Amino acid sequence: MTVQKDRERNETKHLHKFADFTEKRVLEIGCGEGRLTWQYAKETRVAFAIDLDADALRVATIDRPADLESRVYFSLAKSEQLPFSKETFDLAILAWSF
Amino acid sequence: MVHALDEIRRVLVPNGILIDLRPTLDRWLIEVASARETRETGRMLDFPLGLADDEAANQSMSDAKQKGWFTREQEEFFPFFYSWDSPSELEEWIATEWHEFTGLDDKTKQATRSIWASADADARVRVKVKMLITRWRVAAQNLKAVSQS
């Protein structure tokens, strides 16, 4: 049972149409296993991706390419209590969150 | 979610951007798609709690706008597809991954199997999700409030 998500890359195209990630400091809320993170991370200066699902974060960390280890960080955190100082990010993504 | 939006504006720089990317939870379409044609076979069952969540998310963003935290700059809908090689794979996925919030009725299952069986060899089964993407910018009005906090 293999599912393919967004093989048409509609999500990636729209994400890049709506935001320029070049050299940006990015916060992603609701990153899950990092499916969306990999679509923009290479362009950023740094990306912090958070989620409440520890298992998903473990998968994301394992899947993280070596060249992104110093640029993409995953952590367990609540969106209502972000563990960052004010004005830390240029861009935030609320990903599949309600 | 309003608390989360308040936190997001705190950690964004002046003129920072928030991208809100989420599925709308109105009933997702089932399709059989090949390179030659796409045929609709039905819809997923309703999302009894999901619809309320969708509305709540819209309300939270509306509240944030009214509070002067963000201004909406751009918004679009686009399709997002989950794809499987066969109807049985779709059914298995729903039974194991989505059973808590949605399902397929027998009529749609039957229609999907039937249309897929007579479709081209490259036909796949897919669920079409209507996505909403919105770009918000930290409102100028917010800058003074943040600088004082």
Image (cartoon, rainbow, N blue to C red):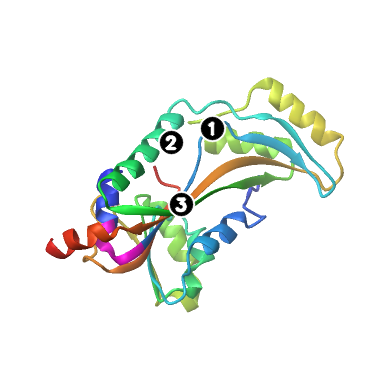
Q: Residue B54 carries which label?
A: 2
Residue for point 67% across, 46% down: B83
On screen, residue B6 above or below B54 = below
Count residues near mark 3 (Cα–Cα under 10 Å), then give few for <14, some for 14-19, many for 20+: some
**In screen coordinates, is A36 left or right of B94?**
left
Q: Are the residues tagged 3 and 1 within 8 Å (C-beta)?
A: no
Q: Where does label 3 land, which residue?
A: B134
Using the numbered discs, state the Cα–Cα distance from disc 2 to disc 3 in whole angstroms: 14 Å
Secondary element at image label 3: strand
Using the numbered discs, state the Cα–Cα distance from disc 3 to disc 1 in whole angstroms: 18 Å
Q: Which of marks 3 and 1 is in front?
A: 3
Inspect the image, locate mark 3, and give the three-letter code of the amino acid beneath it: Thr
Secondary element at image label 2: helix
Q: Which of marks 2 and 3 is nearer the N terminus?
A: 2
**In screen coordinates, is B119 left or right of A27?**
right
User: Residue B74: horizontal and vertical position, in percent?
Assistant: 47, 54
Count residues near mark 1 (Cα–Cα under 10 Å), then give few for <14, some for 14-19, many for 20+: some
- Given the image, what chain letter belongs to the residue carrying mark 1? B
- On the image, which quarter does residue B55 sit in? top left
Inspect the image, locate mark 2, and give the three-letter code of the amino acid beneath it: Asp
Q: Earlier in the sequence, mark 1 or mark 2?
A: 1
The range drawn in magenta is B9-16
